[in-house]
Image: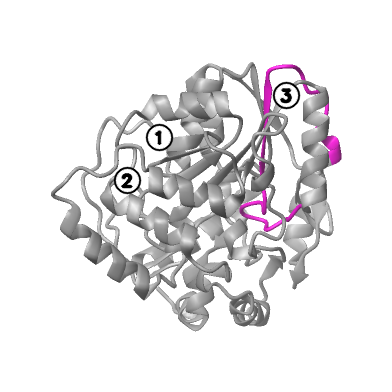
Amino acid sequence: MTEKSSDPDNHLEFWDHGGPAPGEEALCRLDASTTVNPFPSGDLLARLGRALSGATRYPDPFAEEGLLAARRRYGLPPGHIAAAGGATLLLYALIGEGRFSRVVLPAPIFSEYRRAAVASGSCVISLPPARVLPWSGTLAPFLREFFATPGLPWGIELGEIGALRPGDLVVLVNPVNPTGQEFSREEVLDLLQRSQKAQAALLVDESFQDFLCDRSSVIDRAGEGDLFVLRSLTKITGLPGIRAGLLAGPRELVAKVRDRFGPWALGTLEQSLLLWAMEAKREGFGYRPEAKERLLSLLFSEGWAVCPGSGPFVLASPGLRPEEAQALKERLRRRGVRLRQATGFGGRGGEVLFRLGFEALLFPEALMEALRSPE
């Protein structure tokens, strides 16, 4: 993969996301670093092609047809949902408009939540992982020494999220990226009840719920007791270049988020994609959990340890020390294979862990071949 000149005004000191880093060539032979669906719908692509013919005209300024379809799908009353150019944009808008006194972030968590809270001037409360998650496969002695536990100390314990104050915002990703830890609907609603008693708000990021067929979703309750729910359409459609996301929640703050973006928050293609996603069948959007099994089997055979969980990704370790894991990542990058170390999620030891995304599930043999190949 080649390098390009990057914007000198880029504010990130280092890139802790999947996909190409700023200035890096986007194309590669195998990108195991992202959680973007590698099964894009042919029907959706054809629909977007037809929508291009209307791109010479202004789209609906407020995406009313798409929002109506979203309300119907999730059972929400009018005014309780907003759409904009991606879930990340919406989380920044919510935290910026909400003026929360503190943003409570149980780790592991998407790094942009911290950045959004800092940008808004809110105090950030980082909660370290409080639960040990099990390993599967061969656990190297080095990992036992490194983590000082037989499991992976990267789990979130909902019961440990306490001492909340009025004006707080608690953020929970369900299922958790990158561990796949999933909380039942009942557990999330119990956390909402505790947040309500403390006069705090709760944001549940459900970017991966579509792949679980919404089995633990609470989006139908968005707006009750200051409950916000965030959805990404990038993940399910497999088209990260077309940015669209949804935020559901209490009418007053959702209206402020909509007003922040003004008209045309979604363009012609984004609105077409939103309509398709809301009308599509809920059968995992092409993802099948059994796609994971072949990858896990091959990882086990190579001596890797993995953290089993829900969701279309695998958190795994080859048992390498930090400098060795970084060298492996760089070696594969030069061969056109992109991996993501878990350093951006806030848990200790992320430098020895890799989150393997959709393309690893789709092409596990190709990933194993690259791992075995010498320089």
**280 or 316: which is nearer to us?**
280
The residue pinned by badge 1 equals 12
**Distance CA(mark 3)–CA(mark 2):** 36 Å
On the rendered structure, is 21 left or right of 340? left
Q: Height in image: 258 above or below 275?
A: above
Query: Does the magenta segment cover residue 263?
Result: no
The residue pinned by badge 3 equals 200
Q: Residues within 10 Å of mark 3 (few under 14, many from 20)?
A: many
Picture residue at 32% right of the left edge, 33% below the top: 10
Picture residue at 48% right of the left edge, 52% below the top: 69
- The span picked out in magenta is 159-183
Q: Height in image: 196 above or below 206?
A: above
Q: Height in image: 31 above or below 303?
A: above
Q: Amino acid at mark 3?
A: Ala
On the rendered structure, is 237 left or right of 162? left
- Considering the whole magenta stretch, tell me its main secondary structure: loop
Q: State the mark number for residue 22.
A: 2
